[in-house]
Amino acid sequence: MNGAFVFDELLNVEISEMESGFNVEVDVRFREELTKIPHVNAMEMKIENNEGNYFVEELNYE
């Protein structure tokens, strides 16, 4: 985010198991570096298991 925002916390985490991994829906709160104003972005991730390692295969956010 080019230093404009700083990660604050995860909110409303929902994890559902799929056949080969997980689907994660989460709200991520960031704060503006200078003003400290919070911004919440909804994100969805598809995490796949590949030979015992987990990778984010798809990331969607608003």
Image (tube, grey):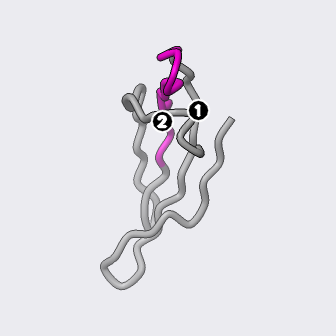
Q: Label for residue 42? A: 1
Q: Main secondary structure of the magenta part?
A: strand
Q: Which residues are magenta?
A: 24-37
* Label drawn at residue 26: 2
Q: Secondary structure at mark 1?
A: strand
Q: Say which quarter of the image contains residue 7.
A: top left
Q: Residues within 10 Å of mark 2 (few under 14, many from 20)?
A: some
Q: In the figure, residue 58 lies in which quadrant?
A: bottom right
Q: State the quadrant of the N terminus.
A: top right
- Horizontal side of 43 relative to 12 (left or right) equals right
Q: Which x, y percent locates residue 38?
A: 51, 18
* Quarter of the view holding residue 54: bottom left
From the viewer's perspective, is residue 48 above or below residue 28?
Answer: below
Are dots 2 and 1 in contact, CB under 8 Å? Answer: yes
Question: Which kind of residue does numbered mark 1 sit on?
Answer: Ala
Q: How many marks?
A: 2
